[in-house]
Image (tube, grey):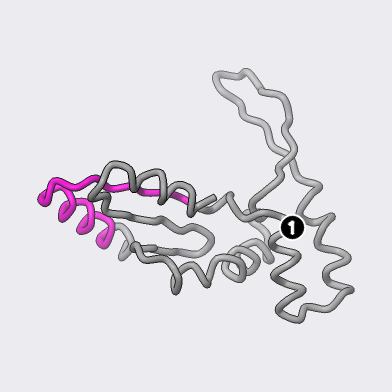
Amino acid sequence: MLTDVCSATEWTSGIQRRRGLIPHLTTTRVNHLGILYRLRSDGVGISVLFVLPQFLTTRSQYVVVDGMRSERVELVSGVPQGSVLGPLLFLQNTSELFNILENDLFGYADDSTLIAVVLIPGSRISIAQSLD
């Protein structure tokens, strides 16, 4: 709820100043190799790191629309939602973003939203590249 209020305030403020705003969700953008590298550099033991690749990489998903099911696709990024480790892995790998990004970043559980005020049209590209 607080995130919604803050986001609404930012949007309203940007619109009043006639500025562009770029919201961006980062929930599924956590790279699997990045997760393992960060955990190892933070001192997580090799026995845990041995199990995590299977936990992260043996996942796939499909979509059903009007009773029609898509092909199953292997997931190459993101953390498992609905698992005990999912939110912990996500927060461990994105927590530093709150300190280093110049724009507003709002987070809740395993989701975050970046709100950037765009003063110059070309800066949209810079913001998008920094997210990759």
Q: Is residue 21 above or below residue 43?
A: above
Observer-nearest of 129 and 115:
129
Q: Is residue 61 left or right of residue 29?
A: right
Question: Which segment did they paint magenta?
Answer: 5-25
Q: Is residue 115 left or right of residue 42?
A: left
Q: Position of residue 49 (x, y in %)?
A: 83, 68
Q: Amino acid at mark 1?
A: Leu
Q: Is residue 16 left or right of residue 121?
A: left
Q: Residue at x 87, y 74 (%)?
A: 46
**Residue 35 falls within the magenta-colored stretch:** no
Q: Position of residue 26 (x, y in %)?
A: 51, 53
Q: Residue at x 80, y 56 (%)?
A: 55
Observer-nearest of 101 and 85:
101
Observer-nearest of 89 and 30:
30
Q: Residue at x 62, y 54 (%)?
A: 81
Picture mark count: 1
Q: Quadrant of the N terminus?
A: bottom left
Q: Residue furthest bottom?
A: 43
| SS for callout 1 | helix
Q: Read off the residue under disc 1.
A: 33
Q: Is residue 62 above or below residue 22?
A: above
Q: Quadrant of residue 10?
A: bottom left
Q: Residue at x 26, y 62 (%)?
A: 6
Q: Is residue 73 above or below residue 130?
A: above
Q: Is residue 44 above or below residue 54?
A: below
Q: Position of residue 121 (x, y in %)?
A: 28, 42
**Residue 20 falls within the magenta-colored stretch:** yes
Q: Position of residue 60 (x, y in %)?
A: 73, 40
Q: Is residue 85 left or right of residue 102?
A: right
Dot 1, crowdedness within 10 Å: few (<14), some or many (≥20)?
Answer: few
